[in-house]
Amino acid sequence: QKFLLPALSLENVSKTFYRGNESKQALRDVSFTIEQGDFFGLLGPNGAGKSTLIGVLAKTVKLNSGTIKALGFDLETQWRQFKMCLGIVPQEITFDPFLTVYDTLRLQSGYFGLRGNQKWIERLLDVLDLSDKKNSSVMSLSGGMKRRVLIAQAMVHQPPVIVLDEPTAGVDISLRHRLWEFMADLNRKGHTIILTTHYLEEAEKLCRNVALLNHGKIVTLESTQSLLKEYSKERILFSLPSEL
Ligand code: ADP
Ligand code: MG
């Protein structure tokens, strides 16, 4: 079933970082579309530009040129609506260390201007197995628990599209499997999932379609199945052609 509006569309998105007299083009004319309901993988080796792309979606990175829309809402001109469409789980874990888990989620809820959202927050805590940590300081949590709070935080406004930047990097195998199950379940419930990863097995297991990014450029965009037929695993993630 095809929906009229794509979950996400990017057109000619470019980003160059400048530091002193050095510059680094992290995204080069990136264009692609993700349909609603997809489980989409953004693949590529370290430094490919995956987190930069996610940063652009979160508006923590300012793009130089291009157009981005979420469910038809424009990132630049309709930011209020745009950000309601997306829940973004960043790669880096950063919290206000002096807040409890519950207050972290309440604060996020307030940021979205939501009132009376307690029931949903309780459900998120339950689903992510954080209920008994509700009143603990986020600082006191293990890495895996922090990762789960980050996911809950991205979901307080019940976004239709959920973007996760390497959520399973550096987490232990049991949490990795639980996160896989969690993401697959959200997708079954109708959420569009966008996942960045440099684990190919993860994409193979979860993603229907993938974009392969290298040196800021889209190398290919296709179904996970056909990508795996065309390229060897080594080729996909380790021996991509060197910088253009
Ligand atoms: P990935 O997430 O795919 O590993 P990133 O998007 O983090 O890749 O990085 C892409 C490129 O942009 C890298 O070469 C990285 O060093 C550079 N880069 C990322 N963020 C910054 C920044 N804030 N300032 C300068 N260069 C950056
Ligand atoms: Mg990254």
Image (cartoon, grey):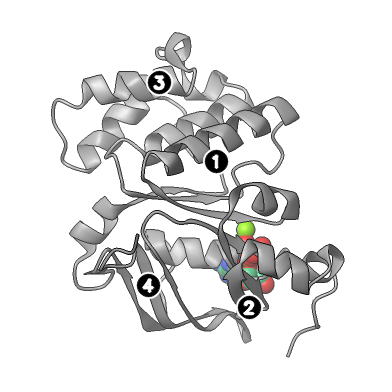
Q: Decide which of 238, 190 is in the foreground and name it.
A: 190
Q: Which mark is residue 9?
A: 4
Q: Decide which of 175, 203 is in the foreground and name it.
A: 203
Disc 1 or 4, which lies upstream in sequence?
4
Residue at which label 2 appears: 220
> Which-is-in-front pick, marks 2 and 3?
2
In what element is the residue under mark 4? strand
Seen at 76% across and 69% down, the residue is 229
Q: Is residue 204 left or right of residue 12?
A: right
Q: Which mark is residue 125?
A: 3
Residue at which label 1 appears: 93
Mark 3 nearby-residue class (10 Å; few <14, some 14–19, many ≥20): many
Q: Quadrant of the C terminus?
A: bottom right
Question: Marks 4 and 1: in contact by CB < 8 Å?
Answer: no
**Disc 3 residue type?**
Leu
**Disc 2 residue type?**
Thr
Q: Report, in whole angstroms, how far the alpha carbon at label 2 lies from the one at label 3.
A: 38 Å
* Residue at the outermost front position: 1
Name the quadrant where ligand 2 sits: bottom right
In what element is the residue under mark 3? helix
Q: What x and y, as percent, mark residue 231?
A: 79, 72
> Which-is-in-front pick, marks 1 and 4?
4
**Disc 4 residue type?**
Ser
